[in-house]
């Protein structure tokens, strides 16, 4: 073990799903990584074989099933768990966290505020981004998120890409760049944390929709229009929820959307493709056990759209397709006739 | 022949390439079409067999090799010829054109001003869009363009898409909508004619670049980033040349770019893919006889970038790849290390 090895800081990752594992692999190019996995058998497999998800991991990645150990040994931690589990994870994690911790999450979805009892008629204050959940449930102040066109399979294969670290704190962005950046992984910084989180969550809706067009074999022309108009609907949501347009037009906005909405390596796109091929949400519950984030985000977004009276026809009709089995062809006909009078109106 | 048949207006199309033919087919859903083709043998084939480019044409499409006949029988005309031939076509066409003619072109490229003798150091006044060429070379006042994610093969197959008609004249937009619109072809309108023409021309550069990444099999993540940053470079060009950001963010901007830069049905993308696979401009001159528009636009854009001192690293390094056989891998390494400090700076 060389001298350099000794001074490497230990960085934490919470969650060893596809993306959490990809982030651990990127971190391991620069530092040592401790990854939290709930299952003891997976922890042991990672520590013994250095293999996970069919991929060989760096020997600089170790696993633990103790959140306490993560908190005690790591200052910088990347929580990357599904949005539906994020708040519960934070509640479990919080007792071990201190004000010096830095949490940069990689979760693309929304959480419902604990104060919201109805579950209906969501307004901005009922819907939280993950950085808000971190602030609500723990003493941690310095939060950030990472988002961009980051299909995990391509990161495993060492293919080049970029991400954006969003944070109010320059220090968090600098730390993210230092630990994550490498010759094949460019890290941008942004201070528009909320805009980036909204973009990251909402884009999964349009990845679903684009997948449906793929399943119906309707071609790239209409997919490109869907992505363009999807970006606009994302901006309308963002404006209603207090974000500027800018995050939606960058790497973590349209960049991530283009990637997720045109690749079968995206889980949301694949889910949509199956819907386009004739499956339903009910039929997919058996074969697609790990629900695509977009399906959950869509339900929340539909209620936000109703509350803010937004003109987001794609979001609304997609909700009918997924949740009420509305006919896909009828939905497309409806959108083709939708009276869009102007092409760009958000600037 | 029914009564409705008699009142159909005859609309002209100049050029029977892939896109000209697609536009003729769309027009023929609403009206009668006269298409100009230079070669007599092609004219005869279309009029006798109603087949062209391996596709069955509507019987409402007839062909002629007389520009005079097009001008005399049609008020509304869609010129769709390669940018390098556009001015010569207009010079030939002009003697037959009258102030009542309406020309909506579908050509995505630039023309060099006749006053520009050096061919070097292009500024805005040396580089013309096709609507400017129409105004310079003819008496026609009411011009427009059409642009959007419109891969011809998908239009032939009847797959749904949308386009944008850009014109200063509401009347031109309305006429374009009336003749081109159908249940599978939505027509938006825009008054930002120049912005749309710049977007339409410049996007071919980034379709080339994206094709190179495809040829190198570098994945969808990096392609999505290329498209995002390509959109930004387009906006920098647009701003320097007097256009607003808006056209670049709509259906005819990012929409067209996404489509062209991710589909092998795009000629510019295919050209780039071959470069990525090891071909050169010289080697492709034999096998890719109909030069991709993007190659020509790239040369002009490079000079505009030098003149306006624009920070457009993708355009500049792509120029070196195509025109000076600069190593593709070195170019990618250079871009991955390019000191982009901010992600979105054009708003």
Image (cartoon, coloured by chain):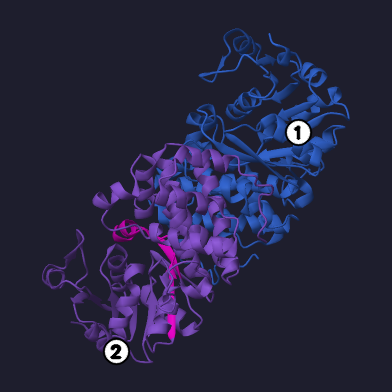
Chain colours: A blue, B purple
Q: Which chain carries label 2?
A: B
Judge left or right: residue B132 versus residue A173: left
Q: Quadrant of the C terminus of chain B?
A: bottom right
Dot 2 and dot 1 residues touching (CB under 8 Å) = no
> Magenta stretch?
B142-164
Q: Nearer the viewer, residue B259 or A94?
A: B259
The disc at residue A175 is 1
Position above or below: A212 against A290: below
The disc at residue A130 is none
In this rendering, which labeled residue sits more in front, label 2 or label 1? 2
Q: How far apart are marks 2 and 1 (CA)?
A: 67 Å
Displayed quadrant of residue A182: top right
Position above or below: B119 against A156: below
Q: How many marks?
A: 2
Q: Can residue B172 be seen in this view?
A: yes
Q: Nearer the viewer, residue B124 or A245?
A: B124
Which type of secondary structure does the marked residue at label 1 adopt?
A: helix
Q: Which of B208 and A207 is in front in this view?
A: B208
Task: Identify residue for label 2.
Answer: B95
Judge left or right: residue A342 versus residue B325: right
Q: Does the magenta stretch include residue B154?
A: yes
Residue A316 x, y percent position in the rendering: 58, 55
């Amino acid at each position: 073990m060389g001298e350099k090895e000794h001074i490497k800081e230990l960085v934490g990752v919470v969650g060893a799903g596809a993306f959490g594992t990809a982030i651990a692999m990127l971190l391991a190019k620069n530092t040592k990584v401790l990854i939290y996995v709930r299952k003891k058998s997976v922890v042991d497999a990672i520590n013994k074989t250095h293999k996970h998800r069919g991929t060989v991991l760096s020997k600089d990645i170790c696993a633990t099933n103790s959140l306490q150990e993560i908190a005690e040994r790591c200052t910088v931690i990347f929580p990357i768990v599904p949005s539906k589990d994020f708040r519960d994870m934070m509640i479990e994690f919080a007792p071990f966290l201190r004000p010096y911790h830095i949490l940069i999450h990689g979760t693309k979805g929304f959480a419902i505020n604990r104060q919201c009892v109805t579950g209906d008629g969501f307004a901005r204050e009922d819907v939280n981004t993950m950085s808000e959940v971190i602030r609500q449930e723990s003493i941690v102040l310095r939060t950030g998120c990472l988002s961009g066109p980051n299909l995990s399979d391509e990161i495993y294969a060492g293919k080049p890409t970029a991400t954006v670290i969003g944070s109010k704190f320059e220090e968090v962005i600098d730390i993210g760049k230092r630990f994550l950046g490498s010759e094949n992984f460019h890290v941008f910084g942004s201070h528009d944390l909320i805009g980036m989180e909204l973009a990251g969550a909402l884009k999964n809706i349009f990845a679903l929709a684009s997948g449906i067009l793929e399943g119906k074999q309707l071609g790239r022309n209409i997919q490109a229009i869907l992505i363009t108009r999807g970006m606009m609907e994302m901006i309308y949501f963002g404006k209603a929820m207090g974000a500027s347009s800018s995050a939606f037009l960058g790497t973590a906005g349209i960049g991530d959307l283009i990637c997720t909405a045109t690749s079968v390596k995206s889980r949301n796109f694949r889910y949509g493709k199956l819907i386009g091929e004739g499956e339903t949400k009910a039929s997919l519950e058996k074969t697609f056990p790990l629900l695509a984030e977009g399906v959950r985000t869509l339900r929340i977004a539909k209620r936000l759209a109703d509350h803010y009276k937004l003109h987001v026809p794609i979001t609304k009709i997609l909700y009918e397709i997924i949740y009420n089995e509305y006919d896909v062809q009828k939905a497309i006909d409806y959108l083709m006739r939708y009276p869009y009078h102007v092409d760009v109106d958000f600037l």
